[in-house]
Image (cartoon, rainbow, N blue to C red):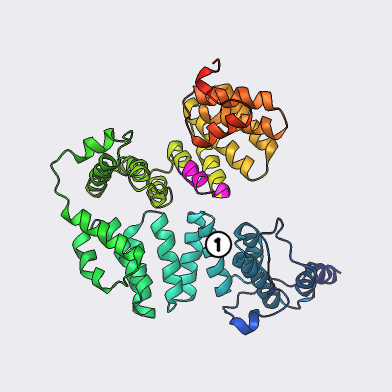
Amino acid sequence: MIVVIASLLAAVAGPTATQEVFRVGPAEMNGPCALKVPDRPSSDEPPAVCATAIAAAANPKDKAILYFAWAYSLNEAGAGVQALPNLDKAVALAPNFANAIHERAYTLGDLAFYDRALVDNDRDVELSPQSADAYTERAFTRHKLANFEGALADRQKAAALGGMNDARAAGIIDELMWLGRYDEAARRAPSLAATDENKQAIAELERRRQFRPDGKEAARCALGDSVDDRAAAQKIIDDCTWAFDHEANPTKRAEFLTTRYVNAVIALQDRRAHIPDLETAVALDPTNPDHHSNLGFAYLGVRHSWAARNEFDRALAAPAIRPKSKMIALAGRGQARANLGDEAGAFADGKASFEIEASAANTWLLGDLMFGKGDKQGAKKLWLASYHLGSRDEALIEKLKSVGVDDPEKEPR
C-alpha cells in the first residue's frame, strides 16, 4: 500500500527533476512559449497557450525548455524581474540545463544580484568550457564585483575561444585601465575601431598616461567633492584616478571613486558615464550604507528606479546605520517607490525620513505626493521647505510656479 500511495503522489506532483546535461538551439525554443511580449508585464505568469503547454509536458526536460523559452521572451522585452522566477523553475526541473543557467546568470547580473549571478556564471563555465559567451558573461559579473583580474582573464579566454573582435578588445582595454596597466592598454588601443566611444576611451587612456603626480593627489581628492568649476573638477578626477590606482585599502579606494563620480558629473555633464565608479565603490565597501545610497540616487538620475530601490533597501539593511544616512536612504527609497507607482510605500518612507530630519529630498517627495492627491497648498508648503532647505533645482522652481510661487525668496520660511 505504501508503494501504491507513493506512486500516486508522484503522479500528482508531476515529473521530477532531470540531471541530464543538455542545451537547446533555436529550433527547440521555437514552441508555444516563444511569444512576443509587447510591453513590460506586471506578472511572470505565462499566457494561456504557454501555460497549457507547460501543464501538458510529459517530462521535466520538456517542461524546463518551455519555462526557459517564456523567460527568454520576457528578457527580450526587458522584463528581467518577471523572467527570473521562470528561469528558477527551469533550473529546478533541469539543474544541468546549460541555456537556462546561462540566461539566469545574465538575468541576475542585469538585476544587480551579482553574488548570485557569479554562482551561475561558474556553473555555466563548468557546463560549457568552450563557450566564449560563458566567459564573457562571467567577466561582466566579476567586473561588477571589482574582481578586475578575474574579469581580464575571462575576457582573454573569450577572445581565445571566439576570436578577437572590437567588443572583446575594448573589454580587455577597459579591464587593464581599471587595473592601472595603462601602457599595456595603449599597446592594444590601435586595434580598436574608430567609434566615438572608443575614441573617448583612448583619449582618457592617454590623459592617464600623461599624468605626472606630485604626491598630493590623495589629499586633493579627499577634499575635492564640492567644486563647481569644470576645469577644477577635471583636475580632481585626475587626482582621484591616480589615488585609486595607488591605494590598496578598499575603503579608501571606494571613497576616491565616489569623489571622482561627483566631479565627473560636473566636468562631463553626464550622469550616466561614471556610474560604474559608484558600482565599484559598493563592491569594494559593501557594508557602507552611504555607498548604496549614492548609487541609488545615481540610478534615480538616469531613471532606473527598480535598481535604485534595491540599493536603498541595501543601505537601510546595513547594521548600525547612522540616523543621517537612514534619513537620506529613506528619502531616496520613497522617491523610487513613487516612480514605481507605490504611493503608500513612498509616503511611508518620506514621512519616516522627515521624522528623522527635514531635508530638501524628503520635503520635495512629500510635496509631490500631496500635489498628486490634489492638495496644492500642502504641496506648496513642502516644496517651499525644500527650497529653503537648499534645493535650487530647476524642476523644483517649475513646481513652485505651478502653485503660484514666482519668487521663493519672498515667501516666508
Among the 4 quarters of the image, the one containing residue 260: top left
Q: Position of residue 168 (x, y in %)?
A: 36, 71
User: Quick check: 372 left or right of 388?
Assistant: right
> Where in the figure is residue 135, as x and y percent of width and height?
42, 70
Q: Residue furthest top?
A: 412
**10 Å crowding of disc 1: few (<14), some (14-19), many (20+):** many
Q: Residue 16, percent across and down?
A: 71, 71
- Whether residue 273 is visible: yes
Name the residue located 42 percent from the left edge and 45 percent from the top edge.
Answer: 282
Instruction: Give the residues drawn in magenta, as a range.
Output: 295-306
Residue at the (68%, 27%) spot, across then down: 376
The N terminus: image quadrant: bottom right
- Kind of residue at badge 1: Thr
Q: Quadrant of the C terminus?
A: top right
Question: In the rendered view, does 130 fall on the left or right side of 342?
Answer: left
| Vertical comparison of 178 with 134: above or below | above
| Total labels drawn | 1
> Secondary structure of the magenta portion, mostly?
helix
Of residues 365 and 2, which is closer to you in this image?
Answer: 365
Q: In the picture shown, does residue 41 fall above or below 217?
A: below
Q: Nearer the viewer, residue 62 or 355?
A: 355
Q: Is residue 349 above or below residue 302?
A: above
In which quarter of the view is residue 30 placed? bottom right
What SS does tag 1 mark? helix
Answer left or right for 181 relative to 404: left
97 lies left or right of 43: left
Pointer 1 residue: 107
State whether residue 286 is above or below residue 137.
above
Q: In this orientation, which residue lies closer to the viewer: 401 or 321?
A: 401
Q: Residue furthest right?
A: 1
Tell me what residue is drawn at x 55 percent, y 18 percent. Answer: 411
